[in-house]
Amino acid sequence: MTTSRTIHFTLNGEPVTAQIGTHQHLVEVLQARGLTGARESCAQGLCGCCTVLVNDVAVSGCLYLAAFADGAEVRTIEHTTDGKLDAVQEAFIECGAFQCGYCTPGFILMTRQLLDEHPDPSDDEIKHYLSGNLCRCAAYSEIIKAVKLAASKRKIAK
């Protein structure tokens, strides 16, 4: 019975090879590489703190087996373009859409996916789309403002 294997994937634009346990979840592999933005909190895929993008689709890193990332493109909150913050990150800072910051990486990654699919979302669409992310500090109104600001920033940038 094989208990480990080697996987190859692209992590934040860089090729990666990792020796993993067949039972390991993606968030564990990322944290072992020093990427701590995705955090395991509930271990049930309910809070969004462990969100990462795999082939541009948001997944719960605490449930997503690392073996499934073999050959995939994985992006975490630590990914930047040319060392600069993107419109979503800027909007979250400008709107103060966080307090403790524990949930912020998951919200930012989900917001990126939301705006890719719905460039001009309504309040209800934002609430529905981000409903799988929990903010224990209750910065929800600021988060909604940040999503709307990010949508505006993206429109201006185009």
Image (spheres, rainbow, N blue to C red):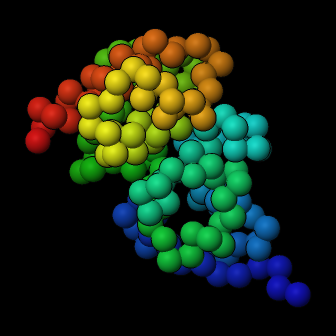
Residue 126 drawn at (x, y percent) = 43, 27
What x and y, as percent, mark residue 107? 49, 33
- Of the 4 image quadrants, the one containing the C terminus is top left
Residue visible at 60% across and 78% down in the picture? 7
How far across and how far down the image is residue 94, in percent? Answer: 31, 18
Of 24 and 57, nearer the camera is 57
Taking the spot 69% from the left edge, 64% from the top edge, the residue there is: 65
Q: Along the horizontal axis of the image, is 93 left or right of 154?
A: right
Quadrant housing the N terminus? bottom right
Of 25 and 56, the residue lying toward us: 56
Q: Is residue 28 visible?
A: no
Q: Is residue 143 visible?
A: yes
Q: Is residue 158 left or right of residue 24?
A: left
Which residue corresponds to the image point at 77% horizontal and 44% vertical from the top-left? 43
Q: Is residue 91 left or right of residue 123?
A: left
Splitting the image into 4 quarters, where does residue 41 fall?
A: top right
* Relative to 51, residue 142 above or below: above
Residue positioned 65% across, 19% down in the render? 136
Rendered view: 135 above or below 49? above
Q: Is residue 149 above or below residue 133?
A: above
Q: Position of residue 63 (x, y in %)?
A: 71, 54
